Image: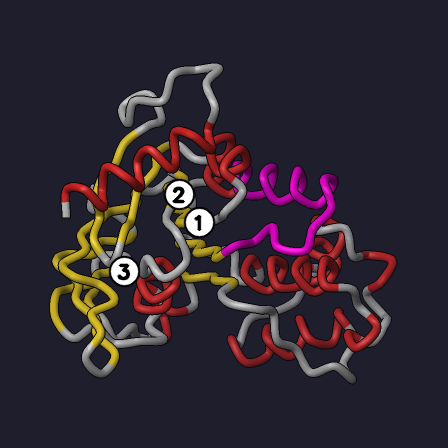
């Protein structure tokens, strides 16, 4: 079976700065793949390309077996939460999701209320978003990403601004989506969380994939210090380059 997301030798530059330099990766159905790297490594740019928001300068990206740009039928099978959540502040949480569902041309049939319950926003569904905390906006962004019951779910720093309960909720939802059969690509600076929720990791440094595999594949000793392991990986990547 072909991977849900496939990137082959993807290159992207802004002006004279190369942000992605020949990145290749795959994400298969039912798997959670985590992107790890320092700020500026190219993770968000790669995710924006994978969702069709940016076009690569070179290389090939396929989503559900089809090359970019995505047809609407394929786009409706992709869910994403990238960058800082942005919603019209005067809308309610329920209203924002209803607007997105209308744009996608999909029926509600109780979907919105189920999602708001799932992300812990049922009681705040009728409140205006301008009164939401950062964590509540992050939960709403996750609900929006799940709205179309996607086959490909892409989440960039989904735990930003969340309390420990919210972080645990995100982890559970990511694992539930993979169990449902979705392919999930996620980035986070919370090393413990990404280690818990991901089946495998992809290390990115200065726009290049430097390593891929499970924690054990990448040399992490169970019970060791994840932070020390991460920085050792970064030092190794910088030395190799």
Q: Quick one: SS at disc 1?
A: strand
Dot 3 corresponds to which residue?
A: 63
Which label's residue is closer to the chain start, 1 or 3?
A: 3
Q: Quick one: SS at disc 3?
A: strand
Dot 2 corresponds to which residue?
A: 34
Q: Residue 11: x percent and y percent?
A: 17, 67
For the residue pair 235 and 218, the one nearer the viewer reads as 235
Q: Nearer the viewer, mark 2 or mark 3?
A: 2
For the residue pair 229 and 183, the one nearer the viewer reads as 229
Marker disc for residue 139: none
Q: Residue 72's quadrant in the figure?
A: bottom left
Image height check: is 207 above or below 203? below
Which label's residue is closer to the chain start, 1 or 2?
A: 2
Q: Residue 170's quadrant in the figure?
A: top right
Image height check: is 96 above or below 169? below
Dot 1, how many residues are within 10 Å of its Cα: few (below 14), some (14-19), or many (20+)? many
**Quadrant showing the N terminus:** top left
Colour setup of the view: secondary structure
What are the residue bounds of the magenta stretch?
Answer: 157-176
Report the Cα–Cα distance between label 1 and label 3: 16 Å
Query: On the picture, is 115 further left or further right than 43?
Result: right
Report the Cα–Cα distance between label 1 and label 2: 5 Å
Q: Residue at x 63, y 59 (%)?
A: 143
Image height check: is 1 above or below 5? above
Magenta span dominant secondary structure:
helix
Determine whether label 1 and label 2 are within 8 Å by CB: yes
Q: Residue at x 47, y 24 (%)?
A: 225
Dot 1 corresponds to which residue?
A: 186
Q: Quick one: SS at disc 2?
A: strand
Q: Residue 202: x percent and y percent?
A: 30, 42
């Amino acid at each position: 079976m072909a991977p849900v997301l496939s990137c082959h030798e993807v290159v992207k530059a802004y002006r004279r700065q190369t942000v992605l330099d020949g990145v290749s990766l795959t994400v298969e159905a039912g798997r959670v793949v985590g992107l790890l790297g320092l700020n500026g490594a190219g993770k968000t740019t790669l995710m924006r390309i994978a969702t069709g928001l940016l076009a690569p300068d070179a290389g090939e990206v396929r989503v559900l077996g089809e090359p970019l740009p995505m047809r609407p039928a394929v786009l409706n099978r992709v869910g994403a939460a990238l960058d800082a959540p942005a919603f019209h502040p005067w809308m309610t949480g329920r209203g924002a999701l209803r607007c997105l569902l209308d744009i996608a041309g999909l029926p509600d049939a109780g979907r919105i209320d189920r999602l708001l319950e799932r992300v812990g926003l049922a009681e705040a569904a009728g409140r205006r978003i301008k009164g939401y905390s950062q964590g509540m906006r992050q939960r709403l962004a996750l609900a929006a990403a799940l709205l179309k019951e996607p086959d490909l779910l892409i989440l960039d720093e989904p735990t930003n601004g969340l309390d420990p309960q919210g972080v645990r909720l995100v982890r559970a939802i990511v694992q539930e989506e993979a169990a449902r059969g979705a392919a999930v690509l996620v980035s986070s600076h919370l090393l413990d969380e990404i280690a818990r929720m991901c089946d495998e990791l992809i290390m990115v440094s200065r726009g290049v994939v430097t390593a891929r595999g499970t924690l054990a594949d990448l040399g992490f000793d169970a019970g060791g210090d994840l932070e020390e392991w991460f920085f050792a990986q970064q030092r190794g990547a910088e030395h190799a380059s």
